[in-house]
Image (cartoon, grey):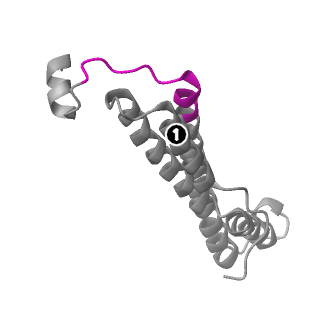
Amino acid sequence: MSSDAREDSMGTGNSQARQVPPEVSDTLNHWRCLAAGIRVLHVILVILAVGCSLVASTVRAPASIVWLSPKLFSFAAALAISLLSAFELGKKANAIRDAWRVLTAAVWRYKYETDFTLEKLIAAYESAERNIGGVKESPSPN
């Protein structure tokens, strides 16, 4: 896409994109990877919890085969469920992805809208960071 076409499509009258501070670009990349990693961990723990629960409730192995013990699979399922509920991994992955979306939109505006200042970009970063929040360390009653 030519700069004139980009100018027309963005409607900004700005033919040159401003350079985004590298710290912001690095943060966007980090949040993207972190959200994907947490989502993968979340899916793995859900599959582990369901699979181990099914095996624990259906497989009857001889006592000599320790690795097929229902107690072992029950423990693994309980551990996976505990980690899922204690850290709310799905919720955290969504929060990080939402923060990434907020900062990405701000980056686009900073690059192509001359009235979108560095201060506004930093404010968008701070807002996105607040949306991520801290790490939840214990299960809630809800």
Q: Is residue 111 magenta?
A: no
Residue plotted at (63% across, 59% down): 89
Residue 31 lies, in percent from the top left, at 56, 40
Dot 1: few (<14), some (14–19), or many (≥20) neighbours within 10 Å? Answer: some
Task: Give residue 141's quadrant in the image.
Answer: bottom right
Residue in the image at 71% along x and 64% along y: 80
Residue under label 1: 32
Q: How far across and how far down the image is residue 137, in percent?
A: 78, 63
In the structure shown, which secondary structural element does the residue marked by tag 1 occupy? Answer: helix
Q: For the N terminus, give its image quadrant.
A: top left
- Tag 1: amino acid: Arg
Which quarter of the rendered picture does the C terminus lie within?
bottom right
User: Which of 30 and 45 lies nearest the eye of the viewer?
Assistant: 30
Number of numbered callouts drawn: 1
Residue 87 locus on image (x, y percent) = 71, 62
Q: Residue at x 20, y 18 (%)?
A: 3
The picture places residue 42, in percent across and down from the top left corner, at 60, 57
Q: Measured along the vertical axis of the image, is residue 27 above or below residue 19?
A: below
Q: Residue furthest front?
A: 115
Asked whether 15 falls inside the magenta stretch, the response is: yes
Compared to residue 43, the image places residue 123 above or below, namely: above
Which residue is more in the foreground, 57 or 90?
A: 90
Please tell me which residue lies in front, 1 or 107. Answer: 107
Viewer-side residue, 88 vs 14: 14
- Left or right of 41, for residue 66: right
Instruction: Please report the bounds of the magenta region as a residue range.
Output: 14-27
Left or right of residue 66: residue 53: left
Instruction: Report which quarter residue 50 is drawn in.
Output: bottom right
